[in-house]
Image: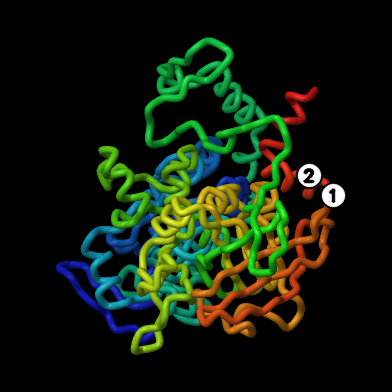
């Protein structure tokens, strides 16, 4: 972080470490009444002490249940939270799934033009890169009372254990200890949150009073679903060309080794060279959709204005959006792209497309390159480092990978659920032997890759990588096939778990 120099635009001044989003959110954290009451008590003491939250900080309260606002109202604490900006935004998933909404254009411009490292503080579950907001690089998970405290402080660079939270009435320094609620104060109010009758009445309304919006939804009758014309939901392509007989998921053919195998991936181009700790948020972001990204351009082409883009998480029912969002995280770095003069790597889902005709490689979005390779009938592979696929294991991280025509991922290690999801979508996970990596192999991204697994796809058996370099030289490397169990072999041989299950159902 390059110091704490402030930058101004109009009435707004922003610097490194400034808190720009403060959210009491999450279906899990807000189910604990003690921390919600603590946040309300802290807000009450802060207001009484004369503390305020700066108006440019985006604050929100989005608990997972109406019960929360009910007991905060009965205890008289909700008005104090509202005075600090924590008014009810709604119920359910908000900031920790990227639904905080945008910052003002002025603040976004200040951040991007001055390369500022600004922050969010939220009581949610997730703070993966670019999930909370694409322009906020520092995102901290905290308890609800600390969210309120840091909103008041306005910066994460202040040590709230030794420095004041802010200045109150008469310019007096107010410390966290002055406004932090005691256990006794919280306990005295717990009876308002532990009201069984209130819970029963609230959840009974789900059946008896679904609400006008739900009531206005009109369905159709019949045995099959009638797919609407929508940018939110579309018929998925996973059963396209479905047939009852088993098929191998790989790209069959004869590779550089001369060995023919229906499970082999032959003549593949490298789509990306990634480093360590590539999360499922890097692979399939959940947050905002950039207007100039493939997904943003597709939405605009279908009449959706930028203000109505919503998020990838909200549009997960439309594969056209989600496959265009695969590897589109604004923070992901494809190390195939050479660094600039300062040594920095370009961020965003880009790659170097090579058509094999002796022409110079062309930089483009990974989605666009994938479509070109698929049109040529050429498979692609991904190389990565340690812990590939960590984080919240969303299904679209594997689905999007498959829809882009990527047949194999070769990494130093995998997160267990994402590895399983890759197999379930018919993508081969392969693991380097100890001490080996794409870096030790000195891969540049212009190589041709053949993947030759054991003919019977024995779980965790050795597989062979055949690397053909641009100068025509060849190298063979042994890797481990991370299809770990016999049932996963069946999934892969059927093209994934979805066609496997359908074949089982139809056969029965």
* Residue 132, quarter of the rendered image: bottom left
Q: Position of residue 343 (x, y in %)?
A: 40, 87
* For the residues bearing labels 2 and 1, Cβ distance under 8 angstroms: yes
Indicate the quadrant containing the N terminus: top left, top right, bottom left or bottom right.
bottom left
Residue furthest out toward the top: 221
Quadrant placement of the C terminus: top right
Visible in this render: residue 119? no
328 vs 467, nearest the viewer: 467
Q: Which mark is residue 486?
A: 1
- Residue lying at 47% horizontally and 46% vertically, measured from the top left: 313
Q: Looking at the picture, tell me which residue is in the foreground, 388 or 427.
A: 427
Q: Is residue 212 above or below residue 340?
A: above
Residue 44, image quadrant: bottom left
Q: In the figure, is residue 494 to the left or right of 50?
A: right
Q: Residues within 10 Å of mark 1 (few under 14, many from 20)?
A: few
* Residue closest to the far left: 10
Above or below for 445 versus 141: below
In the picture as drawn, the residue positioned furthest to the bottom comes out as 342
Q: Position of residue 205 (x, y in %)?
A: 55, 22
The residue that mark 2 highlights is 490
Q: Residue at x 64, y 69 (%)?
A: 256
User: Horizontal and vertical percent for residue 67?
Assistant: 55, 36
Residue 103 x/y as whole percent: 30, 58
Q: Residues within 10 Å of mark 2 (few under 14, many from 20)?
A: some
Residue in the image at 35% along x and 69% along y? 362
């Amino acid at each position: 972080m390059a110091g704490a120099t402030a930058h101004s635009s109009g009435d707004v001044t922003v610097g490194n470490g400034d808190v720009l989003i403060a959210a009491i959110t999450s279906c899990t954290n807000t189910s604990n009444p003690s921390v919600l009451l603590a946040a309300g008590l802290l807000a009450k003491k802060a207001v009484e002490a004369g503390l305020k939250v700066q108006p440019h900080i985006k604050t929100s309260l989005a608990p997972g249940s109406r019960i929360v606002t009910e007991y905060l109202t009965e205890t008289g604490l909700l008005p104090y939270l509202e005075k600090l900006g924590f008014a009810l935004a709604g119920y359910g998933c908000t900031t920790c799934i990227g639904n905080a909404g945008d910052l003002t254009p002025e603040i976004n411009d200040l951040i991007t033009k001055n390369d500022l490292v600004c922050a969010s503080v939220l009581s949610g579950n997730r703070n993966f890169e670019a999930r909370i907001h694409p322009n906020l690089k520092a995102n901290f998970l905290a308890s609800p009372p600390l969210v309120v405290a840091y909103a008041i402080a306005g910066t994460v660079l202040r040590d709230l254990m030794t420095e004041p939270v802010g200045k109150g009435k008469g310019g007096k320094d107010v410390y966290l200890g002055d406004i932090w609620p005691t256990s006794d104060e919280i306990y005295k109010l717990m009876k308002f949150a532990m009201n069984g009758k209130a819970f029963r009445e609230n959840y009974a309304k789900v059946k008896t009073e679904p609400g006008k919006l739900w009531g206005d939804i009109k369905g159709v009758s019949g045995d099959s679903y009638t797919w609407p014309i929508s940018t939110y939901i579309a018929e998925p392509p996973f059963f396209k060309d479905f047939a009852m007989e088993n098929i191998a998921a790989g790209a069959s053919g004869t590779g550089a080794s001369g060995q023919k195998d229906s499970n082999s991936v032959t003549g593949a181009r490298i789509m990306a060279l990634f480093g360590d700790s590539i999360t499922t948020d890097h692979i399939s972001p959940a947050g905002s959709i950039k207007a100039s990204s493939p997904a943003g351009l597709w939405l605009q082409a279908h009449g959706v204005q930028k203000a109505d883009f919503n998020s990838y998480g909200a549009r997960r029912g439309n594969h056209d959006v989600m496959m265009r969002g695969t590897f589109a995280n604004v923070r992901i770095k494809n190390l195939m792209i050479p660094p600039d003069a300062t040594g920095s790597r370009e961020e965003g889902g880009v790659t170097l497309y090579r058509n094999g005709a002796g022409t110079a490689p062309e930089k483009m979005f990974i989605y666009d390159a994938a479509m070109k390779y698929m049109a040529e009938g050429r498979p692609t592979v991904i190389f990565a480092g340690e812990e590939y696929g960590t984080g919240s294991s969303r299904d679209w991280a594997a689905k999007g990978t498959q829809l882009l025509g990527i047949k194999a991922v070769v990494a130093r290690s995998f997160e267990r659920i994402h590895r399983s999801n890759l197999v379930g979508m018919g993508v081969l996970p392969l693991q380097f032997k100890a001490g080996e990596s794409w870096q030790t192999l000195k891969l540049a991204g212009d190589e041709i890759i053949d993947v030759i697994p054991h003919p019977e796809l024995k779980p965790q058996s050795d597989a062979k990588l055949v690397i053909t370099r641009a100068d025509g030289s060849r190298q063979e490397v042994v890797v481990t096939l991370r299809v770990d169990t016999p049932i996963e072999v069946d999934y892969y041989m059927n093209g994934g778990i979805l066609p496997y299950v359908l074949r089982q159902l139809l056969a029965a």
